[in-house]
Image (cartoon, grey):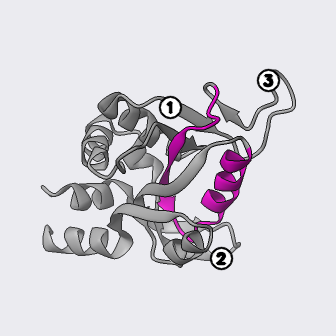
């Protein structure tokens, strides 16, 4: 497979028996950590994502856990500072939900690996805004096409995605 979309799909699409979070059993599973842990894929993803950074962005907000490797690679390519965003503040040390420095007054791009409904981005955007950051955009590698862009729009956030799940599937089918 030569296209990036096809290679992401090939590396992450698994067949077998998988128990989902809902408790249901599926015969197919998409393991996003496989493309995030592959240095060649991650490098190409970051290079492509760099072209999606909105003008005026002053920093990247990588969401725990899957957004962190994507945002780290993107920070290396773009030169923008990186902030690590937890799902909840830790109970020790700095006790902060946002790590990496003062983000007050900065225009941040939220970075996530895969977006399904967009719920975590909404929660994290609320946290970032409460800390004084300006957030109007989010970037993901894959939009699962399950309502994420619409939910985010209600929170004043535009979702930029490198690929939809349908595009990955289509690329994989074309390259077989």
Q: Is residue 111 left or right of residue 152?
A: left
**Quadrant where the image shows the N terminus:** bottom left
Asked if the magenta segment contains residue 121, the reply would be: yes
Q: Is residue 90 left or right of residue 51?
A: right
> Which of these two is toward me, 117 or 99?
99
- Kindly identify which residue carries mark 3: 94
- Kindly identify which residue carries mark 2: 24
> Of the residues under marks 3 and 2, which one precedes in the sequence?
2
Callouts 3 and 1 close, C-beta under 8 Å: no
Looking at this rendering, what residue extends furthest in the right direction?
Answer: 91
Percent across and percent down for residue 127 are 72, 49
Q: Is residue 119 left or right of residue 149?
A: right
- Kindly identify which residue carries mark 1: 82
Residue stretch rendered in magenta on the structure:
102-130
> Which of these two is toward me, 9 or 160?
160
Callouts 1 and 2 close, C-beta under 8 Å: no
**Secondary structure under the numbered disc 1 in the rendered image:** strand
């Amino acid at each position: 497979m030569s296209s990036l979309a096809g290679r992401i799909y090939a590396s992450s699409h698994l067949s077998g028996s998988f128990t989902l979070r809902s408790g249901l059993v599926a015969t197919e599973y998409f393991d996003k950590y496989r493309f995030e842990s592959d240095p060649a894929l991650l490098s190409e993803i970051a290079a492509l994502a760099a072209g999606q950074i909105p003008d005026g962005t002053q920093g990247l907000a990588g969401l725990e856990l899957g957004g962190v490797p994507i945002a780290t690679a993107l920070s290396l390519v773009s030169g923008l500072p990186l902030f690590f965003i937890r799902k909840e503040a830790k109970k020790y040390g700095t006790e902060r939900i946002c790590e990496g420095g003062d983000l007050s007054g900065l225009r941040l791009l939220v970075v996530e690996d895969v977006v399904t409904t967009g719920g975590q981005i909404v929660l994290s955007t609320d946290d970032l805004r409460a800390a004084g950051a300006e957030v109007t955009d989010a970037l993901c590698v894959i939009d699962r096409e399950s309502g994420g862009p619409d939910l985010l729009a209600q929170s004043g956030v535009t979702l930029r995605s490198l690929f939809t799940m349908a595009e990955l599937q289509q690329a994989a089918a074309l390259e077989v």
